[in-house]
Amino acid sequence: MQEILTQEIQLNSSKISVFIRREDLIHPIVSGNKFRKLKYNLLQAKAEKQQTLLTFGGAYSNHIAAVAFAGKENGFKTIGIIRGDELESKIAKNPTLKFAQECGMQFEFVTREDYRHKTEAGFLENLKNKFGSFYLVPEGGTNEFAVKGCEEILTEADSQYDFVCCAIGTGGTISGIINSILPHQKVLGFPALKGDFLKDEIRNFARNENWELINDYHFGGYGKVNPELIAFMNQFYAENKVPLDPIYTAKMIFGVMDLIEKGYFPENSKILLIHTGGIQGIAGMNLKLKAKKLPIIDFQ
Ligand SMILES: *Cc1c(COP(=O)(O)O)cnc(C)c1O
């Protein structure tokens, strides 16, 4: 992969410097980290001579968009099991599903109740009967192959940073980053959702101890936002010309900026933020905000 741009972030006054790795620029629609998480999964699917990728996701899932696109690019059929049977009639109004469908993804809409059983043997057996043989990519894409792909986010030149910060959904991305840091570095993870189970998830994959989860910036839970966060995103864009996504990266960077103000980081710290992408989700979020007559994400 080509070298990914890193840019410095404007801070008011501080003896700390902050840089952002623009993984969001890997592709305009497919999230940076989802691309990395799929790389070795696609190689494995090919090695297993599978022709179809099957995966799971919600209405605005970056992962669904990524699998649909990567499948098309690499000659796989793709099937998306989508949470929420009410969405079937609303594909045209949903930017994520519309994009996935245009990439050739075939959908199976299931109720929220059925979706909860998606990893059970019986559920998967039914899918095999219906669709034939497939390579299963887990929800959010996290497995050992995904972590291996995310071990390629940091490069040798990144040894200059003291802290590496990233947003967390399922924990695959941060696990890859943790596995590739050096002993003098620390990884800070900012969960985009509530729940302490993530620690155990990460321990399954992570091979060292230099990491910490910061649980104070989930803004009420997965997919939840408030006007303060939206205002932060708009201001961050105005100052840095970097678009953030409302589900993951905005919450993480809001958190880092807040911690800087509170004196969390030692003087002269050099911090690297990983922009994991997610920009495709903005259109869907703005539809929801508009419906509630709330301020929208507006990059100008
Ligand atoms: C999925 C996603 C994450 C979370 O990655 P995990 O490996 O699931 O922790 C972070 N940022 C963006 C933009 C994503 O799409």
Image (spheres, helix red, strand yellow):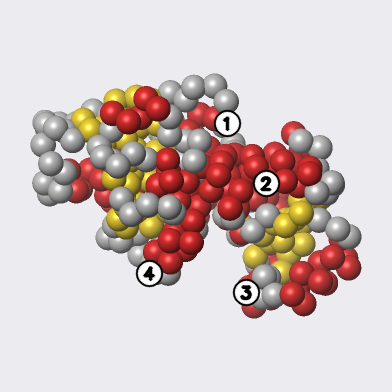
Question: Position of 1 compared to 298: left or right?
Answer: right
Question: Label 2 crowding class (10 Å Cα cut-off): few <14, some 14-19, many 20+?
Answer: many
Q: Percent from the top left, x then y, of residue 274?
A: 39, 38
Is disc 4's CB within 8 Å of ligand 1?
no
Q: Which label lies toward us, 1 or 4? A: 4
Q: Nearer the viewer, mark 2 or mark 1?
A: 2
Element type at marker 1? Answer: loop
Given residues 103 and 33, the one toward you in this image is 33
Q: Quadrant of the C terminus?
A: top left
Q: Earlier in the sequence, mark 1 or mark 3?
A: 1
Which residue was labeled with disc 3?
116
Residues under labels 1 and 3: Cα distance?
31 Å
Q: Are marks 3 and 2 in contact (CB under 8 Å)?
A: no
Q: Earlier in the sequence, mark 3 or mark 2?
A: 2
Q: Nearer the viewer, mark 3 or mark 2?
A: 2
Sequence-first tag of 4 and 3: 3
- How far is mark 4 from mark 3, CA to CA? 19 Å
> Label 4: few (<14), some or many (≥20) within 10 Å?
few
Q: Quadrant of the N terminus?
A: top right
Question: In the figure, residue 185 lies in which quadrant?
Answer: top left
Determine which residue is flagged by label 2.
Answer: 41
Q: Earlier in the sequence, mark 4 or mark 2?
A: 2
Give the total of numbered labels. Answer: 4
**CA–CA distance between discs 2 and 1?**
18 Å
Q: Residue at x 65, y 50 (%)?
A: 64
Quick check: marks 4 and 3 in contact, CB under 8 Å?
A: no
**Residue of label 4:** 196
- Which secondary structure lies at badge 3? loop
Residue 234, visible in the rendered structure: no
In terms of depth relative to the viewer, which is nearer, 109 or 121? 121
- Identify residue type, mark 1: His
